[in-house]
Structure formats: C-alpha cells, structure tokens
Image (cartoon, grey):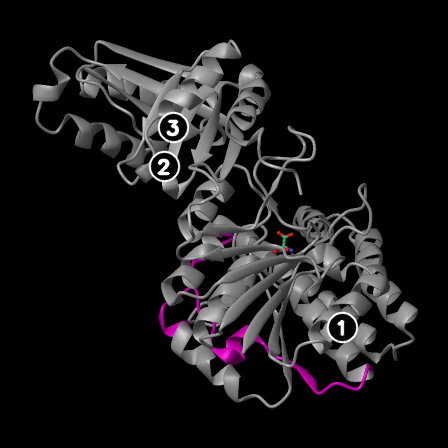
C-alpha cells in the first residue's frame, strides 16, 4: 500500500486534477491520497490558505469578508465547473465556510486554525467527489474519525503517538481514501493545524500509521536539486538522499519537503519518493535510510537567511559550573529557541532565528545575560545567513571542511562561524547575508562542478 500526497499546485485547477487522477489510477497500490488546499495556478496567484488567513483576519477585525468569501468559493467552484461536476459539493463547501465564519471568535488562534484547516478539509471533499464522478470508489475521511490526534499548540501542532495505531484501520477501507492534510484534532475535539506546508506532515503520519511501503510526495518540481535553482542555474538533481540529509537540507531553506515530515517516515523506515505531478514518469528523488556514497561526500548545499547571533565571552568560562545552563535558562524564560551554539574556551555564540526578537526583547535578554552571568562581553549581530554543506559520506572522507573553507576563502567570503556536529552530516557556515549567494555558488562549484547536470 502506498500513501500519496499532492501539494496545492497539483490541485489548483481542473487540468491539474486530471493529472492527479491519472497518477492515482495508474497504480492500484496508491490507496490513500492526502491533499493540500488548492494552491497557485500561476506565479502571481494566491494560495487558498493565504486567502483563508486574510479572510479570518478580516473577520476577527469585524470587517466585511464578503469579497474574500466569494473569491475562495470561486476557487472550488471553478474547478468543479470545468470538470462538469454537479455543484451540490460546492453548496456543501459554501455552507461549511459560512458556518465557520459565523462561529465563536473569542479565541482568535482557534478561529484562525479552523479557517486554515477548512482549505484542505473542503478540498478533500471536492477531490473525493471528483474521483467518484470519474467512476472510482473514493471516500473523504475526516482526521477526527480516523483518530489523528495532535497537541494543543495552535498553528504548530504535533502528532500524539496513539494516532499511529488509530490510523492503521484506514487499511481496511474498501475504496480510495481521500484525506485532508495540514490538521488534526486535540483530544477535546478541537482543530489544530500543523505549521505551514504541513500537509507533508499529514502524509508522513498517515504513511507511518498504515505502515505503507512507500510515501509518494507529488509536487511541482522534478526532483530535489543539489542547490537552490534560484541561486545556481540548472543545478544537478539528487537521485537519492538519506532522511538525515534531507532533514538538514530542508531545515536550511530547501522548501521541497517539510522538515518535520521526515520524522514519522524515518521512524517507520518508509521511503519517501518526491515526484512531479507534471512529469510523473520522471525518476524524482528518493529519501531513504541509507544510500551508497559513490556520488561524493556532499549531497547538497542549502542556505537560509534571517538569523542573528549572540556572542557571549567571559574569562575562565570553561571553569565556571552552570554557566551554560544559566544562559539557556535566560533564553527559555524569554521564549527564545536557539538553533546552534558553537563555543570556545572563554566564549560561546548562540544562533537564533531573528524574527523571534524585537528591539525590546533584545535589550531585555542582553541586560540579563550581562548581569546574571556576569559576562565580559555580550554582542548581538544581525543579518546572518547559514550555509549547510550536507552529506553523510563526509564521515568517510578527509578534507571536506578544508575544501569548503578554501572555496569560500577563494571567493572572498568572510566566514563568521563554523559548526560541525560529531555526526558529520553537515558543516554549517555563518556568513553575512550580503555574501550568502556568492558563498553558495562557490561551494556548489567546489563540490559539483564536475557532476553532469540532469
Ligand atoms: N495549505 C497549507 C499551506 O499552504 C498546507 C500545505 O499546503 O501543505 O501552508
């Protein structure tokens, strides 16, 4: 049995939906279909999820939502009309969205989650109706009925372990299961969404639950590329990579697959196959437990901006018991999560996502760090980009860090910091945002310039 997930751009129009139908029909093992909300039909288009977020924001402000309501409904009805389907399904969707808009708004986060989740929920109903219209035995399954339970956090829920056992029963369903992505229910029966692009997560959870042999993730690119094609033209494609490599790459800016989605697949050892709905016969990229390392030590280079660093130094820091704990406690109390913490004998640097800090919080944290740990120096630097050179085979190769830093030095890039964990899956470089693209090109050239572009 295969679980197959389609992203929003694969479900944005009737033309795309016909492709989805052909993909599903061509393999009888494709039994459970996880769907996103309709995405962009063209580059400047707006995703239905973004329309729903705008609509919810207006409703919360007490402003009129009529125009946005119509636009959202037209996205679904446009698809149904082009297919020549009966419009009763659209009436159902319209009624559902209307009811949500009328519902209690005393908890704005709860209301926002409800609105966002309706994008996938109603699309799953539409897709199920379309498959039936085309003569297939297909049913929409609600995540609550299937037992997909999640934690209480709004917009960033996490799956509760019992869900996996509950979802196993989906195997018994006779026809195709059409399952909405992006959300689950708390034990109290309230909707919570995953973080953005979270339908990938639903697909992985369902694949784990039903113990699928494969999790196919259909999107709108042919494969995962070794580097961001917006930075390096025509980069080579990656045929295979491990879960850990994919996790590192998607953490640092590879948007093809949600980084949180790997965990459920990884735990159950289910291979993930990333493919293109517009080119289903292409070989795509396989994410697996182990790969052979014949294609060199580095599998990909990722980069992401929007980081800042807090540099803390104190003479004889290494001898002071509890120094690190006190720093981390200050961060925790300020609700700041950190990404990396490279350290020296008398100093350490904490790297954080910049968007967590406003000027007031920054001042507050610096004051506390200066006084409570009695630091000699606390310096915050903004505008940092992180580069990740990723590849498990680095472990068996000598000189990868040397090659990377030489390439950066030859390109005139100033390395602000380096971090390499003992797992040796990746080497991280911190550079100034202005030098990010230059650095990525230099690294790509170093590790991939002799690899044929496919
Ligand atoms: N529709 C949601 C989003 O745009 C979830 C998804 O597509 O995976 O973030």
Alpha-carbon neighbours of circle 2 within 10 Å: few (<14), some, or many (≥20)? many
Residue 124 lies in quadrant: bottom right
- Residue 192 visible somewhere in the drawing: no
In this view of the protein, which residue sits in the foreground, 97 or 300?
Answer: 300
Query: Which label lies toward us, 3 or 1?
Result: 3
Q: Disc 3 beta carbon < 8 A from ligand 1?
A: no
Alpha-carbon neighbours of circle 3 within 10 Å: few (<14), some, or many (≥20)? some
In this view of the protein, which residue sits in the foreground, 395 or 246?
Answer: 395
Q: Are marks 3 and 1 in contact (CB under 8 Å)?
A: no
Ligand 1 location (quadrant): bottom right
Residue 57, above or below 90: above
Q: Does the magenta stretch include residue 84?
A: no
In this view of the protein, which residue sits in the foreground, 393 or 14?
Answer: 393
Residue with the mark numbered 2 = 394
Q: Distance between the residues labelled 3 and 1?
A: 45 Å
In-image side of 52 versus 259 (left or right): right
**Residue depicted at 68% across the width and 61% down the height:** 119
In-image side of 326 versus 108 (left or right): left
Position of residue 105 measured from the top left corner of the image (x, y, whole percent):
60, 57
Which span is picked out in magenta?
134-163
In-image side of 372 versus 423 (left or right): left
**Residue depicted at 57% across the width and 15% down the height:** 434
Residue with the mark numbered 3 = 400
Examine the residues drawn in magenta and state their main secondary structure.
loop
Classify mark 3: helix, strand or loop. Answer: helix
Residue with the mark numbered 1 = 21
């Amino acid at each position: 049995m295969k679980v197959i997930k389609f992203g929003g751009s694969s479900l944005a129009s009737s033309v795309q939906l016909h492709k989805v139908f052909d993909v599903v029909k061509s393999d009888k093992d494709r039994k459970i279909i996880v769907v996103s909300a309709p995405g962009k039909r063209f580059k400047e288009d707006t995703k239905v999820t973004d329309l729903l977020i705008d609509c919810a924001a207006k409703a919360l402000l007490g402003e009129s939502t009529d125009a946005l309501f119509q636009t959202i409904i037209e996205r679904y009805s446009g698809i149904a009309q082009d297919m020549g389907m009966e419009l009763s399904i659209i009436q159902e969707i319209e009624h559902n969205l209307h009811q949500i808009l009328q519902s209690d708004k005393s908890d704005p986060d709860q209301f926002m989650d409800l609105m966002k989740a309706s994008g996938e929920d109603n699309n799953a109903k539409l897709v199920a109706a379309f498959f039936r219209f085309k003569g297939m035995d297909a049913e929409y399954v609600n995540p609550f009925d299937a037992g997909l339970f999640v934690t209480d956090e709004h917009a960033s829920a996490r799956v509760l372990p019992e869900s996996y056992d509950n979802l196993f029963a989906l195997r018994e369903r006779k026809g195709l299961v059409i399952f909405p992505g992006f959300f689950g229910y708390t034990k109290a029966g309230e909707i919570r969404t995953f973080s953005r692009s979270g339908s990938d997560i639903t697909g992985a959870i369902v694949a784990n639950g039903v113990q699928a042999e494969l999790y196919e993730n259909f999107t709108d690119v042919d494969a995962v590329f070794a580097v961001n094609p917006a930075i390096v033209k025509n980069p080579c494609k990656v045929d295979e990579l491990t879960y850990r490599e994919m996790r590192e790459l998607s953490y640092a800016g590879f948007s093809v697959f949600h980084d949180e989605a790997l965990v459920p697949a990884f735990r159950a050892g289910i291979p993930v196959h990333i493919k293109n709905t517009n080119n289903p016969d292409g070989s795509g990229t396989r994410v697996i437990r182990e790969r052979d390392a014949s294609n060199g030590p580095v599998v990909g280079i990722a980069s992401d901006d929007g980081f800042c660093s807090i540099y803390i130094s104190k003479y004889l820091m290494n001898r002071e018991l509890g120094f690190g704990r006190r720093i981390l406690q200050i961060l925790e109390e300020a609700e700041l999560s950190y990404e990396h913490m490279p350290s020296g004998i008398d100093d350490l640097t904490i790297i954080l996502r910049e968007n967590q800090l406003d000027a007031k919080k920054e001042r507050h944290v610096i004051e506390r760090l200066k006084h409570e740990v009695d630091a000699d120096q606390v310096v915050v630097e903004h505008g940092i980009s992180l580069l990740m050179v990723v590849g498990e085979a680095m472990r068996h190769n000598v000189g990868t860090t040397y090659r990377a830093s030489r390439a950066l030095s030859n390109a005139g890039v100033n390395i602000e910091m380096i971090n390499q964990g003992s797992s040796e899956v990746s080497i991280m470089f911190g550079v100034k945002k202005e030098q990010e693209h230059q650095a990525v090109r230099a690294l790509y050239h170093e590790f991939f310039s002799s690899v044929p572009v496919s």
